[in-house]
Image (cartoon, rainbow, N blue to C red):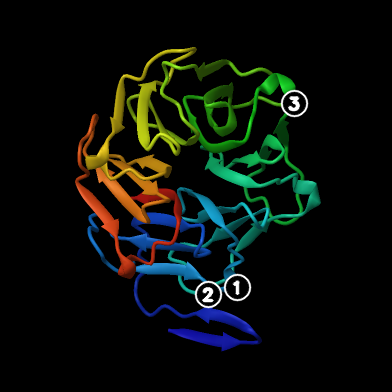
Amino acid sequence: MVAFLAGCAVVLRTGPVVVSGIYVANAAGNSVSVYPMDASGDVSPVRVIVGPFTRLETPVSLALDPSDRLYVASVSGNRITVYGPGAVGNTGPVRVVEGPDTLLSGPSGVALDAFGLLYVANAAPSRVTVYPAGAHGNVPPVRVVEGGRTLLATPRGIALAGGELFIANSSANSVLVFDASASGNVPPLRQLSGSLTGLLEPAAVAVDAFGRLYVANAAGNSVTVYPSSASGNVPPEKRLAGSATGLSTPRGLVVDPAGRLVVANAAGNSVTVYAPGASGDTPPLRTLSGPRTQLDLPWGVAVRP
């Protein structure tokens, strides 16, 4: 049920807030759609965040905090919007990070650490900005990673694991790894790059519970997997690619707690889910696609079991 009060859309919920599911950022639809964890086929979302009050403007990356607040990076809007648990419809964010002091510049990746610090990969100019927990408004970052020594070149996806920051360095066909506390014009701890890596326009990264690094290669229609300690020009341990996989310009990925790989396919307007350890030309366990899904250039993805 939706009511209008003083020019604002107010969503009134009469039942329990449901937060579990697969969350997808639809870059062309200026929306976030949510599906049951076991959804498959041409099914409608259980919730959609969409409308002018949401302030979504080409959303491309998502993160969920332990309190089920949803963080969304809008690359065209140069802002990060935060929504309360169970947000639905044309509802406004509870917090917004935007303004010249934020140094947001084409925010394309968003991640949260255990202390609530907000990490953002900015594509143009290339930098990583870090904000305090609960950041709101035109707030300056507490740290910035930027400069020639960083090797950043159109960073897209971003992930935190084991005290390290992993970055999909799209223009350079590389993955950069920094200490999570890095600041300034500092070199990465290590760099994964070269012809053997199979990296082709890396767009998103994720690290699973066993320390494996997953990379979505938008230009390669593939997902490559490495040890999180991988460095240099090394081949992947596994490569998921081929016509049976359904991968089509993968730009978002996440590994759920059960080890299943969930991928947002921008060109295919689909979300594909793979069994733990899937590799080669392996078909997905499930595929979300079709007009009822309301997928519209799906880019970022997050899960809450």
Q: Specify few, some or many for label 3: CA neighbours under 10 Å numbering under 14, 14-19, or 20 or more.
A: some
* Residue highlighted by disc 3: 147
Name which of mark 3 and mark 1 comes first in the sequence: 1
**Residue drawn at (73%, 56%), measured in percent from left and top?**
137
Contact, CB < 8 Å: mark 1 with mark 2?
A: yes
- Which amino acid is tagged 1? Phe
**Residue drawn at (47%, 56%), measured in percent from left and top?**
25
Name which of mark 3 and mark 2 comes first in the sequence: 2
> In the image shown, does 131 or 226 lie closer to the viewer?
226
Q: Is residue 236 left or right of residue 186?
A: left
- Which amino acid is tagged 2? Asn
Distance from Cα at disc 1 to Cα at disc 2: 6 Å
Residue 115, x across and y down, in percent: 56, 38
Which corner quadrant of the image does residue 141 belong to? top right
Q: Secondary structure at mark 3?
A: loop
* Residue highlighted by disc 2: 90
Q: Is residue 52 above or below residue 299?
A: below
Distance from Cα at disc 3 to Cα at disc 1: 36 Å
* Residue highlighted by disc 1: 53
Q: Secondary structure at mark 2?
A: loop
**Residue drawn at (60%, 58%), measured in percent from left and top?**
81
Residue 145, x across and y down, in percent: 69, 29
> In the image shown, does 127 or 207 lie closer to the viewer?
127
Quadrant of the image containing the N terminus = bottom left
- Which amino acid is tagged 3? Gly
Distance from Cα at disc 3 to Cα at disc 2: 39 Å
Q: Nearer the viewer, mark 3 or mark 2?
A: 3
Q: Is residue 49 above or below residue 225?
A: below
Q: Residue furthest right?
A: 101
- Specify whether residue 277 is in view: no
Residue 217, x across and y down, in percent: 43, 34
Q: Nearer the viewer, mark 3 or mark 1?
A: 3
